[in-house]
Image (cartoon, rainbow, N blue to C red):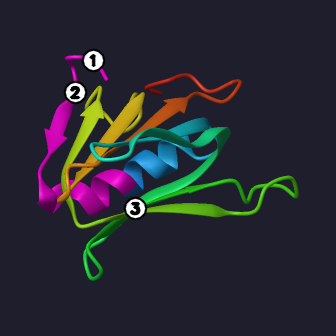
Amino acid sequence: MTQTRTERPLIEWRDFLERLTAEHQGDEVTIEVMNPEIGDQDEAERLAFSYLEYDNKDDVVIVAVGGQDGRYPLLRHIIYHPRKILVDPPSPGSARAVEVEDQEGTHTIVTLRPRAGRNPGS
């Protein structure tokens, strides 16, 4: 992520991620997990983005990919007890990356690439 990333306040997480999902559904997404104890791992690479949401009841952020055609089932990556959400750039429509840090210090980076025919930030 670049220096233009902005931390979103907790009170905005749910609504912001809903808007981001509406703008980016079907874009290609890569999910990378950076864990201080076990290193960096790719969870998904260039799959169709389904949604990104915050569930305040269970205190989790869920990233879902696939499920839009018969090639890939809907896959969910769950981040328990998030403490920060950073977005680069800060607008839901033009966001290229979302970084979620959990209470253990693990960082999950969701990189978004616009689908063919979609103008970023439109």
Is 39 a magenta residue? no
Residue type highlighted by circle 3: Glu
Q: Name the residue rendered at 61%, 37% in the picture.
A: 27
Q: Who is closer to the viewer here, 120 or 71?
A: 71
Under circle 3, the secondary element is strand
Look at mark 2 in the image and give the residue it sits on.
Answer: 5
Look at mark 3 in the image and give the residue it sits on.
Answer: 53
Q: Name the residue rendered at 49%, 42% in the picture.
A: 23
Name the side, left or right, on which 42 lies relative to 19.
Answer: right
Relative to 24, residue 121 above or below: above
Q: Name the residue rendered at 75%, 55% in the picture.
A: 68
Residue range corresponding to the magenta coloring: 1-17
Relative to 14, residue 84 above or below: above
Quarter occupied by the N terminus: top left
Q: Who is closer to the viewer here, 120 or 85?
A: 85
Structural distance between the alpha carbons of marks 1 and 3: 23 Å
Name the side, left or right, on which 84 lies relative to 71.
Answer: left
Residue type highlighted by circle 2: Arg
Q: Dot 2: few (<14), some (14–19), or many (≥20) neighbours within 10 Å?
A: some
In the rendering, which numbered label is found on residue 19? Answer: none
Which circle's residue, 1 or 3, is located before the other in the chain?
A: 1
Look at mark 1 in the image and give the residue it sits on.
Answer: 2
Name the side, left or right, on which 73 lies relative to 17.
Answer: right
Q: Cβ–Cβ below 8 Å for labels 1 and 3?
A: no
Under circle 2, the secondary element is loop
Structural distance between the alpha carbons of marks 2 and 1: 6 Å
Q: Cβ–Cβ below 8 Å for labels 2 and 1?
A: yes
Q: Dot 3: few (<14), some (14–19), or many (≥20) neighbours within 10 Å?
A: many
